[in-house]
Amino acid sequence: MKKAILFLLLVSMLALAACGSQSTSGPEGGSKNEKLVVGTDAAYAPFEYLKDGKIVGFDADLLKAVMKEAKLKYELKNTGWEPLFASLKSEQVQAGISAITINDKRKQTYDFSSPYFESINKILVKEGSPVKSVDDLKGKKVSVQNGTTGQDALEKKFGKGEANVKKYETNVLAIQALLNGEVDAVVADNTVVDEYAKNNPDKKLTVVNDKTNFESEYYGIAFPKGSENKKKIDKALQTVIDNGTYSKVYKKWFKVEPNLDALKK
Ligand code: ARG
């Protein structure tokens, strides 16, 4: 007798739980409650990289905080860099977070959140390299990740083709080319090359800063043009910045306080 009641109780609890997991607490006013797919190229530590098969990094943590604030369900998907842009265009992904620099060229095709991180390109070379500036890269082989602002900066300086720019599918491969001696330098975002040099002292690398040739850049979350999610995510991002969550995530990854004023441009 008691057993039967317990059993009924269990069945009804399970039924309730099943219902609960389906009726997602979707955004107010929004009729859809499916997950947003957010694309990334998880080969750009410390912003996004794979650890034990999971995508981790500053971007992953920031996205988590922002989506929680926006009450949006999402799945972060490792699409790769160039496929990410194609998937945004075809709306196979609803957003992208991948240390993506907001620039005029990209703004023609995609929408962006407000800026969430300031960045600049830097040059990674082997210790003892004669390269001390972008000018010194003339006639040298330089690797970049295909389709990045590092590639744009070099092509702007040296023209397409002339600079001997070698393009790789991932930044990891671009760095590998330097380690192998295939190229003389890598151009990529400051935080990425700084961290790489610091975390791999055995590789004996030096980072070259050239503020006259490289310009300050800002990362944003990318959306297909006209996406309704931009507004919600911008609002949540601002809240996360104002309530200290952004600073917490920033300190976790970079060990210092962020300069929040740099984001208000
Ligand atoms: N910030 C640079 C750009 O937007 C490089 C970003 C590369 N990101 C990545 N996850 N591989 O072009």
Image (cartoon, helix red, strand yellow):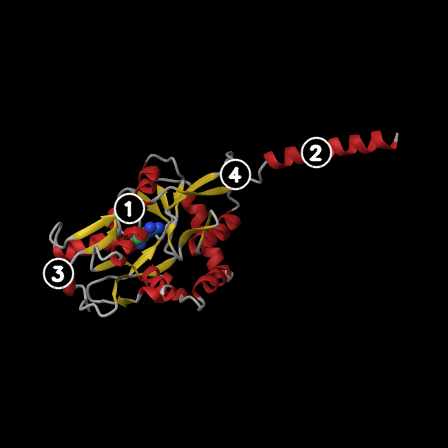
Of 131 and 111, the residue lying toward us? 131
Residue 59 lies, in percent from the top left, at 42, 53
Label 1 neighbour load within 10 Å: few <14, some 14-19, many 20+: some
Question: Is the residue under label 1 in contact with that under label 3 (CB below 8 Å)?
Answer: no
Residue sticking out furthest to the right: 1
Residue 146 lies, in percent from the top left, at 25, 48
**Of tags 2 and 3, which is closer to the observer?**
3
Under mark 1, the amino acid is Glu
Question: Mark 2 or 4 closer to N-term?
Answer: 2
Label 1 element class: loop
**Would you name the residue on which mark 3 appears?**
138
Question: Mark 3 or 1 closer to N-term?
Answer: 3
Residue in the picture at 49% in, 48% down: 67
Question: Mark 2 or 3 closer to N-term?
Answer: 2
Under mark 4, the amino acid is Gly
Q: CA separation, marks 1 and 2?
A: 47 Å
Under mark 3, the amino acid is Lys
Q: Is mark 1 within 8 Å of ligand 1?
A: no
Under mark 2, the amino acid is Leu
**Vertical placement of residue 223 versus 246, above or below:** above
Residue in the picture at 13% in, 50% down: 160
**Would you name the residue on which mark 1 appears?**
169
**Would you name the residue on which mark 2 appears?**
14
- Tell me the tag on residue 29: 4
Label 2 element class: helix
Of 131 and 150, the residue lying toward us? 131
